[in-house]
C-alpha cells in the first residue's frame, strides 16, 4: 500500500512538471473559446454544394479504424517534433464526416473483400468474396455465375471517364480487385491459386480479370508474380524462388496487356527510375508493379528503388486528369491492415501517416469545385489506446501509470491473440524493452478484425460549375 502511494505521488508530480510544457495561450480560457467560435462559424459559413462531380477520388485506409486514426494523428505531429495531439490531418479538414457500420451478410466481423464489395459495388456480400452478391458462396465457383455485381469503376468507365488504382498491396488484393473482378474467392490471385473444380467450372483468376474486364488506365501497386508464367525470374529478385512467376497456364499477362494497347502510349515499369521517367502528359496507360507481392512497408521502403504512396498518387492523378470527362481513382493504404495483423503498431501508424500525406497530395492536385473526395476505412482492428500518457508522450511508448501488478504497459495494445500475453498468470515485464522510436510490439497477430464504426471523411465539389 505504501509503495502504491509513493508511485501515485510520483506520477502526480510528473504530471505537474509535464504540464509546464504547455503553450501559454492554452492556459487562457479564451483561447479555447475562440477556437470553438471559429470552428462553428466556419460550419455556418459553408455553402451548400449541389454540383455533379466530374472527378471522384476514393482514399481507403484498409483496417484504419478510429483508434488507428487517432494514434496516427498524434504520430504525424510527433514526427514533426510537435506534441502531436493538436495535429490536423489532411482528412481532418474535410467538411463532412459520417459513420458506417461494417458487417458482412454472413459474419458480424467483415474482411476486406466483403467490405470492398459493399462500398465499391453498393451490395453487402459474404466473407472472402469480391464483386458478387450474397447468393455466391465462398470458394464455390459455380455459385458466382449470374451473381456478379458491377463497381463504381465500371460505372465511371462506361460514363467515359478515365479510371485508376493505386495501392500499397498487390493489385490483385481484395480491395483493388473488387473494382474490376468477380470471384467467389479473394485468394484466387492467379490460376495457380485456384482449385481444379473452379477451373473446370470456367472461373478465371483475378490477375487475368485485371487486364480483361475493364480498360483500366492506371494500375499501380505490387503483384508481378501473379502476372507471369511459372519459373519466370523476377527482374528485381532473380535469386528468390518465392518471387518468380506463379502462373501455370503459361500466360504472360504483362505482355498481353502491352499488346492490347497497340496505338496508345502504354508504359509498364517495375522500378522507380523507369517510373520517374514516365511523362504523365504523354502517357495513355500505365502499369507499375514494384514488387512480386505487396509493396514494402513505408519505414522499410528504399526511396531510390520504390516510390512512396504520395508519388504514385500524384502520377496517377496527372495521367487521369487529362480526360475532359473526368476520372475515378481508388487509392488504398493497404498495409495499415497488414501491419495490424502482425501486431506491429509502429508499422501500421507510419503507413497511416503516409496515407494521409497521399490524401493531401490528392487535394492539392484537384479542384474542390469539381471533385468528390472520400477518405474512409473498411474495417477496424482490436487495437486499444489506453492509460493516461502525458501530453506529447510518444504514442509508441509506455503509459506513466503502471498496472495493479506493478508493471508498466504500452499506450497502444492489441486486444486479442498473442498480442495480449499472460504467462504463468502474469503479464510480461517490459520495463527494459524499448524500440528505436519507443516501444512497439512485433508479436504475430491472428487475422481477426474489430467490428464497429468507421469514420468516413467526404469532401464534395464545393462551388457551382456546369454539370458533367
Image: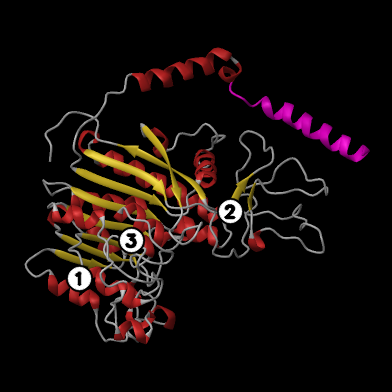
For marks 1 and 2 on the same chain, the one whose residue lies earlier in the sequence: 1
The magenta stretch is 1-23
Kindly report the distance in space between the C-alpha atoms of the residues bearing marks 1 and 2.
Answer: 38 Å
Q: How is the image coloured?
A: secondary structure
Q: Which residue is mark 3?
A: 176
State the residue at coordinates (40%, 75%): 139
In this image, 62 relative to 135: left or right? Answer: right
State the residue at coordinates (19%, 33%): 51
Q: Nearer the viewer, residue 278 or 296?
A: 296
Q: Nearer the viewer, residue 429 or 60?
A: 60
The reply to whether the magenta stretch includes residue 159 is no
| Residue, far top | 30
Q: Are marks 3 and 2 in contact (CB under 8 Å)?
A: no
For marks 3 and 2 on the same chain, the one whose residue lies earlier in the sequence: 3
For marks 3 and 1 on the same chain, the one whose residue lies earlier in the sequence: 3
Picture layout, residue 429 above or below residue 19: below
Task: Identify the secondary structure beneath mark 2.
Answer: loop
State the residue at coordinates (62%, 25%): 22
Identify the image quadrant of residue 158.
bottom left
Q: Which residue is mark 1?
A: 212
| Residue, far front | 135
Q: Which residue is mark 2?
A: 382
Picture layout, residue 320 above or below residue 114: above
The reply to whether the magenta stretch includes residue 2 is yes
Task: Identify the secondary structure beneath mark 1.
Answer: helix
Q: Position of residue 334 (x, y in %)?
A: 42, 58
Q: Position of residue 235 (x, y in %)?
A: 33, 76
Q: Nearer the viewer, residue 182 or 62?
A: 182
Q: Position of residue 82 (x, y in %)?
A: 54, 35
Q: Nearer the viewer, residue 369 or 308?
A: 369
Amino acid at each position: 500500500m505504501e509503495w502504491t502511494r509513493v508511485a501515485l505521488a510520483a506520477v502526480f508530480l510528473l504530471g505537474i512538471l509535464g504540464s509546464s510544457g504547455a503553450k501559454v495561450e492554452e492556459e487562457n480560457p479564451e483561447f479555447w473559446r475562440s477556437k470553438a467560435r471559429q470552428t462553428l462559424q466556419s460550419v455556418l459559413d459553408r455553402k451548400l454544394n449541389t454540383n455533379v462531380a466530374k472527378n471522384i477520388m476514393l482514399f481507403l485506409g484498409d483496417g484504419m479504424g478510429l483508434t488507428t486514426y487517432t494514434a496516427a494523428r498524434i504520430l504525424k505531429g510527433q514526427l514533426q517534433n510537435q506534441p502531436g495531439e493538436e495535429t490536423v490531418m489532411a482528412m481532418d479538414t474535410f467538411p463532412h464526416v459520417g459513420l458506417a457500420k461494417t458487417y458482412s451478410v454472413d459474419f458480424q466481423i467483415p474482411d476486406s473483400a466483403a467490405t470492398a464489395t459493399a462500398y465499391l459495388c453498393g451490395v453487402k456480400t459474404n466473407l472472402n468474396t469480391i464483386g458478387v452478391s450474397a447468393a455466391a458462396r465462398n470458394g464455390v465457383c459455380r455459385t458466382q455465375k449470374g451473381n456478379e455485381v458491377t463497381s463504381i469503376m465500371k460505372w465511371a468507365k462506361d460514363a467515359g471517364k478515365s479510371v485508376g488504382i493505386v495501392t500499397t498491396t498487390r493489385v490483385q488484393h481484395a480491395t483493388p480487385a473488387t473494382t474490376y473482378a468477380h470471384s467467389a474467392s479473394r485468394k484466387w490471385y492467379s490460376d495457380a491459386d485456384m482449385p481444379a473444380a473452379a477451373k473446370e467450372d470456367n472461373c478465371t483468376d483475378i490477375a487475368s480479370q485485371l487486364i480483361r474486364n475493364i480498360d483500366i488506365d492506371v494500375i499501380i501497386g505490387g503483384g508481378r508474380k501473379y502476372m507471369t508464367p511459372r519459373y519466370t525470374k523476377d527482374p528485381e529478385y532473380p535469386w528468390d524462388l518465392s518471387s518468380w512467376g506463379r502462373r501455370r497456364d503459361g500466360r504472360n499477362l504483362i505482355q498481353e496487356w502491352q499488346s492490347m494497347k497497340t496505338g496508345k502510349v502504354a508504359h509498364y515499369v517495375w522500378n522507380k527510375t523507369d517510373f520517374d521517367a514516365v511523362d504523365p502528359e504523354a502517357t495513355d496507360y500505365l502499369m507499375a508493379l514494384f514488387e512480386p507481392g505487396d509493396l514494402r512497408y513505408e519505414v522499410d521502403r528504399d526511396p531510390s528503388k520504390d516510390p512512396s504512396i504520395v508519388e504514385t498518387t500524384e502520377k496517377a492523378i496527372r495521367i487521369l486528369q487529362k480526360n475532359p470527362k473526368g476520372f475515378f481513382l481508388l487509392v488504398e493504404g493497404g498495409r495499415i491492415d497488414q501491419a495490424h495483423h502482425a501486431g506491429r503498431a509502429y508499422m501500421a501508424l507510419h503507413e497511416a501517416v503516409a496515407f494521409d500525406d497521399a490524401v493531401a497530395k490528392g487535394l492539392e492536385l484537384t479542384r474542390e469545385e469539381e471533385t468528390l473526395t472520400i477518405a474512409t476505412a473498411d474495417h477496424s482492428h482490436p487495437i486499444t489506446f489506453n492509460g493516461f500518457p502525458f501530453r506529447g508522450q510518444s504514442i509508441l511508448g509506455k503509459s506513466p501509470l503502471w498496472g495493479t501488478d506493478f508493471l508498466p504497459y504500452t499506450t497502444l495494445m492489441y486486444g486479442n491473440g498473442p498480442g495480449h500475453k499472460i504467462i504463468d498468470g502474469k503479464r510480461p515485464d517490459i520495463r527494459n524493452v524499448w524500440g528505436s522510436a519507443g516501444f512497439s510490439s512485433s508479436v504475430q497477430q491472428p487475422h481477426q478484425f474489430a467490428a464497429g464504426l468507421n469514420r468516413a471523411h467526404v469532401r464534395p465539389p464545393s462551388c457551382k460549375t456546369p454539370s458533367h
